[in-house]
């Protein structure tokens, strides 16, 4: 299908189709708080790893010309949290995408629990087994469509030790973290393998946690 | 774990740990060609959706101070392809991460087949059931670590019609697309549900393709 045909697709069809093309996505809840204490929580499927040292993560936000509580809170407080969505509460997480009034906390509306640490201003999601607190670093505008990439530095990670393998790999399946497709598809996963570091002179081998 | 502790982790442990934090990732092969016809193929786990109209996708590249054949080819030819990694060739896809000399085509080294369309200069991966051809739009630098976000406009999508549901949703499971964790974990998926568009006054419902 060529660009010209994609442009002519019915809007909802095009949205679903193009949103599907990147493959599986992460499912994360981003928690923020306004300067006057109003909590906000919203699901994002665009969180990406940007670097390990310094530890940086980013996510994509649609144009900020329409009010975005998450964006406003991040700019105002310099703080946000990223929290994994798991099998046991993905429907609650999905519900945070509804357009609630600013005065409504999506935590309460969706039935999730805010959790505060001493080191991060924004609220974490207590139900999440992988909680990441970040400080705002910069925002990059994608000129072609006015979308923003929000970049944060990791300030604190709260994760149960039993989810961390001896080499630092997080067992996302043990955590029950979901994968997302398109705008509304939620999936559980089953590990095929971890593969050894790729080198030109040999084929990749499956590696087990027991040998790490 | 606080920022200061993350910084002190052994390098490999830190790399695995921080790379795990974003959750599940897409697995895609990016195909390019140099002006003199040298093909290049590399696996990326950072491809993200940026917008449906215009249809835009992006991915993250590490600093370009070290030679990156993919980046150089995109800048030189204005063209690249994104191709889903599937269950039946994820080990071959992983192998493209090895540091081959410029004169070696990762297609040949990994045992994958280049495929050319009339509309896109860069090579697709014939084995991939979801092939996307893009033109280079812009490159954004993340100042905090010199990483680049490469942005492309979708010029052509090659996908089997039977993978597209009536509302435009792509059935990634039917395609056999994998999800990736950390740097080296490959996963198959099992759909939990697609959920209805979130609205403040009702709980999300599971939607079936049959009713769309």
Image (cartoon, coloured by chain):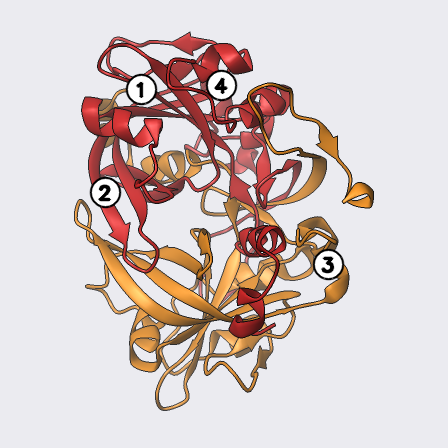
Chain colours: A red, B orange
Between the C-alphas of marks 3 and 1, the distance is 43 Å
Q: Which mark is residue A198?
A: none
Q: Establish if A134 lies above or below A4.
A: above
Between the C-alphas of marks 4 and 2, the distance is 26 Å
**Mark 1 sits on what residue?**
B1
| Camera-nearest label, 3 or 1 | 3
**Mark 3 sits on what residue?**
B163
> Which chain letter goes with mark 4?
A
| Camera-nearest label, 2 or 1 | 2
Between the C-alphas of marks 4 and 1, the distance is 16 Å
Crowding at mark 4 (Cα within 10 Å: few <14, some 14-19, many 20+)? many
- Helix, strand or loop at disc 2? strand
Badge 2 and badge 1 in a common chain: no
Q: Are marks 4 and 1 in contact (CB under 8 Å)?
A: no
Instruction: Looking at the picture, tell me which residue is in the foreground, A111 or B126.
Output: A111
* Residue ID at (38%, 67%): B99
Q: Establish if A114 lies above or below B47.
A: above
């Amino acid at each position: 299908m060529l660009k010209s045909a994609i442009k002519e697709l019915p809007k909802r069809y095009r949205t679903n189709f193009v949103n599907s093309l990147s493959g599986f996505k992460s499912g994360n809840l981003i928690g923020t708080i306004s300067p006057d204490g109003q909590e906000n929580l919203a699901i994002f499927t665009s969180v990406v790893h940007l670097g390990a040292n310094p530890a940086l993560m980013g996510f994509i936000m649609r144009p900020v010309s329409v009010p975005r509580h998450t964006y406003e809170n991040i700019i105002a407080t310099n703080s946000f949290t990223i929290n994994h969505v798991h099998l046991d509460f993905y429907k609650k997480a999905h519900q945070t995408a509804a357009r609630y009034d600013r005065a409504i906390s999506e935590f309460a509306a969706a039935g999730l629990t805010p959790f505060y640490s001493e080191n991060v201003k924004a609220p974490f999601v207590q139900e999440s087994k992988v909680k990441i607190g970040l400080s705002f670093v910069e925002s990059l505008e994608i000129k072609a469509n006015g979308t923003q990439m929000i970049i944060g530095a990791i300030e604190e990670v709260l994760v149960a030790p039993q989810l961390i393998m001896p080499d630092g790999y997080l067992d996302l399946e043990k955590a029950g973290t979901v994968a997302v497709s398109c705008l509304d598809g939620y999936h559980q996963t089953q590990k095929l393998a971890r593969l050894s570091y790729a080198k030109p002179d040999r084929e990749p081998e499956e590696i087990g946690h027991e040998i790490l």
